[in-house]
Image (cartoon, rainbow, N blue to C red):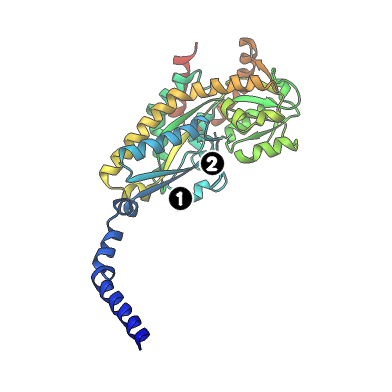
Amino acid sequence: MRTFLAISSIIVAGFLSAIFIGFDTNESKHSLDYDDEQEMLDNQIVIRFSHVVAETSPKGAAARKFAELVYEKTDGKVKVEVFPNGVLYNDNNEWEAIQNGNVEMIAPATSKLTSRYPRWQLLDMPFMFPDHQAVQEAYEGEIGKTLIEDFKHDNVKPLIFWYNGFKQITNRKYPIIEPEDFERTHFRTMPSDVIKEQFHLMGASTSVIPFNKIYRNLEVDFIDGQENTISNIYTKKLYKHQPYLTFSNHGYLGYAVLVNRDFWDDLPDDIKGQVSQALAEATDWNRRHAIEINDMHIRALKRTEQTEIYFLTQEQEEEWKEKLEPIYIKFKPIIGEELMEKALKLREKYSH
Ligand code: LMR
């Protein structure tokens, strides 16, 4: 009986204290709700930004800079998640991904847009841009504005151009110096008819291969060579299977930063302004650092001692230009006389 009374009084005491202390449902509910970080996450806008290159390349570094600036300028209301190295989407499926809104942003090489927008091949014309200033004037001036209009009817909107650098030639067989050295070689290209024609005029055959498959195709000798910027050659270790590199500066590789149009149009005006400002600053950073990053990677490449580096003499460069001249005639009707003339004027202005 005494045991029964003791147990009953413990249960009653426990029940009473639960009523006064433990069963305060308002208190526990309030403490869960009151978490401003959770609240912010609920409304956070996420921009998934997919690209195919290394994080330390000019595009990879600019994407990270953009992410930092967006977070800072929007007080964390917008977060850019960057997916580098083609981990999410690659050359073959990133266009579809952005069209469908599976990612919000991509920044493909302009050459990869040429099958949709043939006029963009202007930017692939060999020896069209004598130096970086000529490229900047093309991207940020009238030529860039005209090209961007081609996207009017798509669910993808180009926001701005980003910079990488001039392309150089690598090869596994022997040094490529004279145009004839291209004969009987097989080159990887990006999907652009101008680039394909450039190699064909030199006597080489070509295959279009996505960026992330270049290394493997060099490793198994399916291709003998490829053209790319030093930063891509170095960061993707392409030099491991390419003992010869020619500094030809024959074409420029840059990017169009694209956003899903529906996503962009739905952004509140203040947020759109802050993201645009972040993009302008990231572009400024990219323009200032792209040359420096490529220079840093050429020094690192030299230190590997795995590639012999050749420079074209003025005379050799003239031979390349002469051999490639027919491209200008063949592609003029595709690019349009007006655009072509504008670019040729730029070429003249910046020719040294
Ligand atoms: C390539 O495919 O060689 C380049 O477009 C890669 C890149 O995005 O720089």
User: Label 2's element?
Assistant: loop
Quadrant of image for the N terminus = bottom left
Q: How many C-alpha atoms fall within 10 Å of the one at disc 1: few (<14), some, or many (≥20)?
A: some
Relative depth, front residue between 193 and 49: 49
CB atoms at circles 1 and 2 under 8 Å apart?
Answer: no
Q: Image height check: is 280 above or below 94?
A: above
In which image quadrant can residue 194 be found?
A: top right
Please give the name of the residue rendered at 56% of the width and 45% of the height, measured from the top-left corner: 87
Tell me how far mark 1 sits from mark 2, CA to CA.
Answer: 16 Å
Numbered-mark total: 2
User: Label 1's element?
Assistant: helix
Residue 159 is at least partly visible in this image = no
Is residue 181 found left or right of 145 in the rendered image? Answer: right
Give residue 98's position: percent from left, percent from top: 46, 48
Give residue 196's position: percent from left, percent from top: 62, 33
Residue type, numbered disc 2: Ser
Relative depth, front residue between 352 and 102: 102
Relative depth, front residue between 217 and 85: 85
Residue 107: mark: none
Is residue 175 found left or right of 125 in the rendered image? Answer: right
Residue 155 is at least partly visible in this image = yes
Residue 99: mark: 1
In which image quadrant can residue 159 be found?
A: top left
Residue type, numbered disc 1: Gln
Give residue 265's position: percent from left, percent from top: 32, 48
Relative depth, front residue between 197 and 224: 224
Give residue 335's position: percent from left, percent from top: 49, 32
Q: Which residue is mark 2?
A: 115
Please give the name of the residue rendered at 39% of the width and 36% of the height, measured from the top-left corner: 68
